[in-house]
């Protein structure tokens, strides 16, 4: 995941309360990944982006989900989906 947000306050105060707590967010993302099964990695990516954007300080989030053992009858090393979202749209 990649988050976009203004870090100037956190840089000035050196206080985790002034930024996204990456440990807390990681826990939320792990809960989504290990939670309700989904059929598509696109749906998983959308849920992860939505979780990242739940913090009002985040202006954009990009998440890549890999599925190296996708059910494809051809030789491949990895399948992935990258989703970029802002509070108003995903692409």
Image (spheres, rainbow, N blue to C red):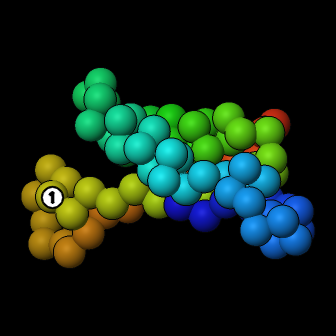
The quarter of the displayed image where residue 12 is located: bottom right
Left or right: residue 81 versus residue 56 is left
Residue at image position (61%, 44%) is: 52
Q: Secondary structure at mark 1?
A: loop
Left or right: residue 65 versus residue 7 is left
Between 69 and 50, the one lying in front of the other is 50
Left or right: residue 88 versus residue 42 is right
Residue 90 image point, x, y percent:
69, 44
Residue 10 image point, x, y percent:
80, 64
Residue at image position (68%, 35%) is: 54
Residue at image position (47%, 60%) is: 64
Circle 1 sits on which residue? 69
Q: How many marks?
A: 1
Residue at image position (53%, 61%) is: 1
In the rendered image of this protein, does residue 10 appear above or below residue 26? below
Between 18 and 2, the one lying in front of the other is 18
* Mark 1 nearby-residue class (10 Å; few <14, some 14–19, many ≥20): few
Is residue 56 visible in this depiction of the protein?
A: yes
Is residue 40 visible in this depiction of the protein?
A: no
Between 40 and 1, the one lying in front of the other is 1
The quarter of the displayed image where residue 19 is located: bottom right
In the rendered image of this protein, does residue 90 appear above or below residue 6? above
Residue 84 image point, x, y percent:
65, 54
Residue 40 image point, x, y percent:
35, 38
In the rendered image of this protein, does residue 45 appear above or below residue 62? above
Residue found at the very far top of the displayed protein:
36
């Amino acid at each position: 995941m990649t988050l976009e947000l203004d870090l100037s306050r956190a840089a000035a105060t050196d206080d985790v309360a002034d930024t996204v707590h990456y440990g807390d967010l990681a826990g939320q993302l792990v809960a989504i990944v290990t939670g309700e099964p989904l059929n598509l990695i696109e749906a998983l990516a959308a849920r992860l982006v939505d979780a990242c954007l739940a913090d009002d300080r985040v202006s954009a989030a990009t998440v890549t989900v890999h599925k190296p053992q996708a059910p494809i009858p051809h030789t491949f090393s990895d399948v992935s989906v990258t989703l970029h979202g802002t509070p108003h749209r995903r692409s």
